Image (cartoon, rainbow, N blue to C red):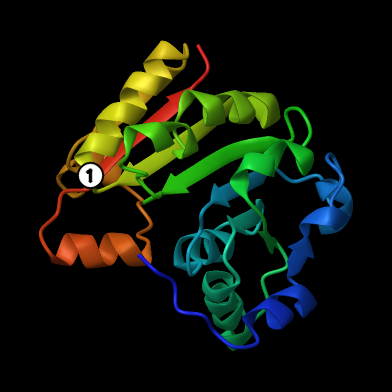
Amino acid sequence: MRLRNIPGAKETVAGHSACIQEASVPAGSWQTIFGNARPIHIEIGMGKGQFITTLAERHPEINYIGIERYDSVLIRALEKLDARETPLPNLRFIRMDAANICSVFSGEEVAHIYLNFSDPWPKDRHAKRRLTSAEFLKRYDRILAPDGQIEFKTDNTDLFSFSLEQAEQAGWKVIGCTWDLHRDTAMNERNVMTEYEERFSAQGNPICKMIISRP
């Protein structure tokens, strides 16, 4: 899907106080940025920000970081933030490619990782680019706390099958799995929907979800 260019998006994102520039974030500095030592939860490929903004509002005791590589998408999350009547001091955004994630987070700095409706990269030669591939799981292993977890949601059953296989082959433990989240009472409890999730669910598409951790 081709993204629509939004004039001025790059400049707006670069100048926004809630958006941290990748080059200015040495690994291990997030406690300084937030001014506290609360747990850090990140969403990689956060899109327009509905999911992570909702979480930040519900859980002020947790620091949230949304990661998005496209200015024309990230600007929509910033607009949502600016439209709020009350600020969210526990929410920051960073524009970057997820492949560089280890450059901005140190070992065990992240308590929880969310992956929502990630690009499926359907061609086999692009499998390494999938955010649930073994290559990315190695990156997450470096930054995730010992008891940390990864949550992944998608409506793409092929990508979900691939993700389960990759997690198991890499030695991760699947502690939660459903092929139809909204019909799974236990897994769906306290679920926060993304924009894509609302759209796909309205079309009748089942939502798949897995939660994984280290053994």
Q: Is residue 38 left or right of residue 146?
A: right
The residue located at (74%, 46%) in the rendering is 38
The residue wearing badge 1 is 181
Residue sitting farthest toward the front: 125
Note whether 86 is above or below 57 in the view shown.
below
Indicate the amino acid at tag 1. Answer: Leu
Res. 85 in view: no
Q: Is residue 187 left or right of residue 45?
A: left
The residue located at (61%, 55%) in the rendering is 67
Residue 173, horizontal then vertical, whole percent: 42, 16
The residue located at (54%, 49%) in the rendering is 44
Residue 128, horizontal then vertical, whole percent: 47, 32
Residue 104, horizontal then vertical, whole percent: 77, 44
Note whether 143 is above or below 155 in the view shown.
above
Q: What secondary structure is marked by label 1?
A: helix
Residue 182, horizontal then vertical, whole percent: 19, 49
Res. 100 in view: yes
